[in-house]
Amino acid sequence: MKDTYSIKELQRETAAAIRTAEDGTLVTITRHDRPVVHVLSAERLGAILETMELLAEPNFMRQLKNLRAGKLKMYPASSLAD
């Protein structure tokens, strides 16, 4: 699956580039062999934005640091009572 297209290639292969992005791959568009644009799916962009929102939340970051330091214990959701 191709993930880099020149502008000229993109003009001929737009549908293929979009399908690649929809499948979750970052597609890079180049001009004179230099990246100028990246195309990603709405789903991937949503995930990136959600991650950025979490990382901007002080309480989340505090809990993440505690988890990484081994101060928190994780349990599988299946262990929760119905």
Image: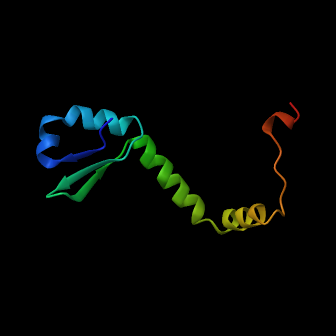
x, y percent for residue 9 = 14, 41
- Residue 80, compared with residue 61, is above or below; it is above
- Residue 32, compared with residue 21, is above or below; it is below
Viewed as shown, does residue 9 lie left or right of 45?
left
What residue is rendered at 53% in x and 53% in y? 50
Q: How is the image coloured?
A: rainbow
Viewer-closest of 43 and 19: 19
x, y percent for residue 2 = 29, 39
Viewed as shown, does residue 37 lie left or right of 31?
right
Viewer-closest of 53 and 27: 27
Q: Quadrant of the C terminus?
A: top right
x, y percent for residue 72 = 83, 59
Residue 53 lies in quadrant: bottom right
What residue is rendered at 82% in x and 62% in y? 70
Q: Quadrant of the N terminus?
A: top left
- Residue 54, compared with residue 1, is above or below; it is below
Residue 73 lies in quadrant: bottom right
Q: How many marks?
A: 0
What residue is rendered at 24% in x and 58% in y? 35
